[in-house]
């Protein structure tokens, strides 16, 4: 008999492309069908068939406090009663902007938008407006949302101007996108030496988390900062995942490197659709209506979304020990995961920074997109399906992160490791 999830999926594919509103939610890459989720609490997800899963996705990062945090929910409910949207300035937007500027010192001014994609697109526009240059360097394997100019990953090869990864993206849109190799300053330097005067910005995930988790090697972020300074280009940190996760001041605080512009998303919305971009005052003062870089949004700074975000960020700010706990939990879990792999005699790799990590089914050390791609996605599919059957919900792709939240207990993580160990011995 079909499950409710299966029935819903059959209906969904008739009216929604692929049955999902974002491709990562499809289970195609592990040869399965999506579970339709009905509710969530703490570290658990419940699907339409009332199966309960221990969750390691956390809505792809935002639910750092765990699902259904009472304070956040109360703030959202109060905001709803006052009004869902006004399309006018509100006090909550001032509170949010002050909070972000206080928590992330490199952000002197900030603009709210509705998604990480929109924030990246706008930050790139601001960088181009400020420098009067067109070219952008991005790294193979880094994801910055689906805006045209950044849909260039690795297919293009390292040293060539970008070729789009998606149908419908005109070659003109990616002509100014240069691709470099993550953790390889030489490839960045080569671009600068060839056309440094034309490069507006380098955009990077300070910890890459969209090709699995790839930490920056020592000196990499610093090297980018220096190259940008030498050539008058801006350094943009895409902290949509790392922001408010590795530390309250993000990866820039964690690694002590200051970008010119920062892109935020996910955690900043507390589960609501929010993105933000901000940075040095002189750059942000170019954004309309202050300056000539146009950017707008009917629902930007939406009062309900702001309420959720402010509530979550305030809780994080008021509990500095949460980051110690979360990072310790991450170290504990991923170091033990490494041991499990080692004890199983398998050559596989575990990467992690704090509460973000990946188990890669490859024997190569994973430091960039090339090495990430050596992972055996068939073994990953078996692993993911096995864990799902045992009610552990991991992102259905080898190239997505494992996200821990404050709601994960040692007991839960121990059980997870036990299950993974059984899988490792089985194959
Ligand atoms: C998720 C993500 C984005 C895009 O954010 P959306 O809200 O999905 O548009 C951008 N950059 C990074 C690093 C992300 O992980």
Image (cartoon, grey):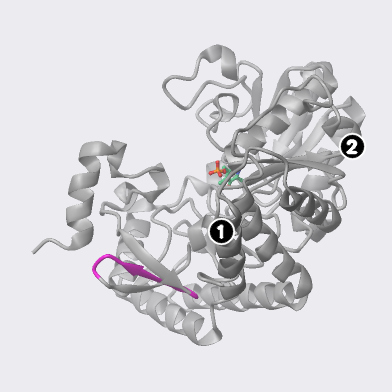
Specify whether residue 46 is painted magenta: yes
Q: Which residues are magenta?
A: 42-49
x, y percent for residue 427: 31, 69
Residue at 80%, 56% (x, y): give it. Answer: 99
Q: Which residue is outermost to the left?
A: 1
Query: Foreground residue, 413 or 74?
Result: 74
Specify whether residue 267 is painted magenta: no
Residue at 72%, 53% (x, y): give it. Answer: 92
Q: Is residue 241 visible?
A: no
* 3D distance between C-alphas at marks 1 and 2: 35 Å
Tag 1 residue: 81
Write down the quadrant of residue 184 in the picture: top right
x, y percent for residue 335: 60, 75
Query: Foreground residue, 301 or 58?
Result: 301
From the image, which quarter does the N terminus lie in?
bottom left
**Picture layout, residue 260 above or below residue 195:** below
Tag 2 residue: 281
Q: Is residue 99 left or right of residue 125?
A: right
């Amino acid at each position: 008999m079909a499950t409710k999830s299966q029935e819903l999926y059959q209906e969904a594919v008739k009216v929604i492309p692929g049955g999902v509103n974002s491709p990562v939610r499809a289970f195609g890459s592990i040869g399965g069908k999506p579970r339709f989720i009905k509710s969530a609490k703490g570290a658990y997800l419940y699907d339409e068939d009332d199966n309960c899963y221990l969750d390691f996705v956390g809505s792809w990062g935002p639910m750092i406090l765990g699902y259904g945090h009472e304070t956040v929910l109360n703030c959202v409910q109060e905001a709803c009663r006052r009004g869902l949207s006004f399309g006018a300035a509100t006090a909550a937007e001032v509170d949010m902007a002050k909070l972000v500027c206080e928590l992330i010192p490199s952000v002197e001014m900030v603009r709210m938008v509705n998604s990480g994609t929109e924030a990246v697109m706008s930050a790139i526009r601001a960088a181009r407006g400020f420098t009067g240059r067109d070219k952008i360097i991005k790294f193979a394997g880094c994801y910055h949302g689906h805006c045209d100019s950044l849909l260039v990953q690795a297919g293009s090869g390292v040293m060539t101007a970008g070729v789009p990864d998606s149908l419908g993206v005109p070659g003109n849109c990616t002509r100014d996108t240069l691709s470099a190799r993550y953790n390889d300053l030489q490839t960045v330097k080569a671009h600068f030496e060839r056309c440094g005067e034309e490069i507006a910005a380098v955009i990077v995930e300070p910890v890459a988390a969209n090709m699995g988790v790839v930490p920056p090697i020592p000196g990499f972020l610093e090297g980018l900062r220096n190259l940008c300074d030498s050539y008058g280009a801006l350094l943009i940190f895409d902290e949509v995942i790392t922001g408010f996760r590795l530390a309250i001041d993000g990866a820039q605080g964690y690694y002590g490197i200051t970008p010119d512009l920062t892109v935020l998303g996910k955690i900043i919305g507390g589960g609501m659709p929010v993105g933000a971009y901000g940075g040095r005052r002189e750059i942000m003062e170019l954004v309309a209506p202050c300056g000539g870089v146009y950017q707008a949004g009917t629902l930007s700074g939406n009062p309900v979304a702001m309420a959720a975000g402010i509530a979550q960020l305030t809780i994080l700010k008021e509990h500095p020990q949460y980051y110690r706990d979360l990072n310790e939990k991450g170290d504990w879990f991923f170091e033990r995961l490494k041991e499990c792999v080692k004890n199983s005699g398998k050559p596989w790799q575990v990467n992690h920074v704090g509460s973000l990590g990946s188990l890669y089914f490859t024997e190569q050390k994973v430091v960039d997109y090339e090495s990430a791609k050596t992972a055996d996605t068939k073994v990953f599919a078996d692993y993911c399906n096995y864990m799902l059957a045992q009610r552990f919900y991991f992102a259905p792709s080898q190239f997505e992160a494992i996200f821990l939240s404050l709601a994960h207990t040692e007991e839960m993580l121990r059980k997870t490791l036990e299950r993974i160990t059984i899988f490792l011995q089985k194959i």
